[in-house]
Image: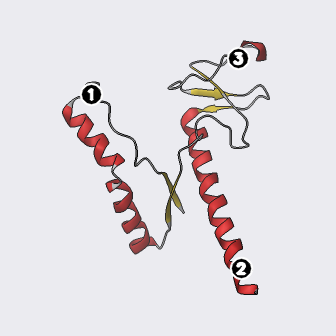
């Protein structure tokens, strides 16, 4: 299964990037890339694709704990700051450390798996009745 964040409500920032760069971002955000991947994955390889909500994919660990986000890891657990958007590293007081992109990808995959498993369970319950 290939899972994507559903980024339909996001828009490129005006005045921050060049016109061509904004066109590329809009192309991605409008779902054209998702539609092409969905078509190729299903037709050629019989792989399912899904979109999940991007809510809290970067703010939480895969276990649902809040994360510290910064450019370098703190030397002691007492030096954790609050969440800082855009930083590359995430960590928790419990010792979990990862790249923010890897953490978000894990969360997106877990959301897709949870949704798929709940749909399978609902389908099995309806067949048993």
Q: Residue at x 40, y 49 (%)?
A: 8
**Badge 2 or badge 1: first in the primary sequence:** 1
The answer to whether residue 2 is above or below residue 77 is: below
Q: Which residue is mark 2?
A: 124
The answer to whether residue 62 is above or below residue 73 is: below
Within 10 Å of the Cα at label 3, are there few (<14), some (14-19), or many (20+) other Cα atoms?
Answer: some
Within 10 Å of the Cα at label 1, are there few (<14), some (14-19), or many (20+) other Cα atoms?
Answer: few
Q: Residue at x 39, y 41 (%)?
A: 10
Task: Tell me, for residue 80, which label it has, or none.
Answer: 3
Left or right? Give the position of 23 relative to 120. Answer: left
Q: Are marks 1 and 3 in contact (CB under 8 Å)?
A: no
For residue 18, what is the image quadrant?
top left
Element marked by disc 3: loop
Q: Are marks 2 and 3 in contact (CB under 8 Å)?
A: no
Q: Residue at x 68, y 38 (%)?
A: 61
Assign the N terminus to one quadrant of the image: bottom right
Q: Residue at x 59, y 26 (%)?
A: 89
Within 10 Å of the Cα at label 2, are there few (<14), some (14-19), or many (20+) other Cα atoms?
Answer: few
Assign the C terminus to one quadrant of the image: bottom right
**Badge 2 or badge 3: first in the primary sequence:** 3
The one nearer the camera, 53 or 46, is 53
**Residue sitting farthest toward the right:** 94
Q: Nearer the viewer, mark 2 or mark 3?
A: 2
For residue 36, what is the image quadrant?
bottom left
Q: Which residue is mark 1?
A: 17
**What's the distance in space between the residues labelled 2 and 3, CA to CA?**
45 Å
**Badge 1 or badge 3: first in the primary sequence:** 1
Element marked by disc 1: loop
Element marked by disc 2: helix
**What's the distance in space between the residues labelled 1 and 3, CA to CA?**
32 Å
> x, y percentage for residue 32?
32, 55
């Amino acid at each position: 299964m290939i899972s994507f964040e559903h980024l339909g409500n996001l828009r490129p920032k005006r005045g921050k990037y060049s016109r061509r760069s904004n066109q590329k971002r809009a192309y991605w955000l409008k779902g054209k890339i998702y539609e092409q991947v969905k078509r190729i994955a299903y037709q050629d390889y019989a792989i399912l694709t899904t979109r999940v909500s991007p809510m809290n994919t970067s703010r939480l660990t895969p276990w649902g704990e809040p994360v510290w986000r910064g450019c370098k890891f703190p030397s002691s657990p007492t030096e954790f700051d609050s969440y800082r958007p855009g930083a590359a590293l995430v960590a928790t007081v419990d010792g979990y450390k990862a790249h923010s992109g890897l953490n978000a990808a894990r969360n997106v995959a877990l959301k897709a798996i949870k949704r798929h498993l709940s749909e399978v369970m609902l389908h099995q319950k309806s067949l048993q009745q």
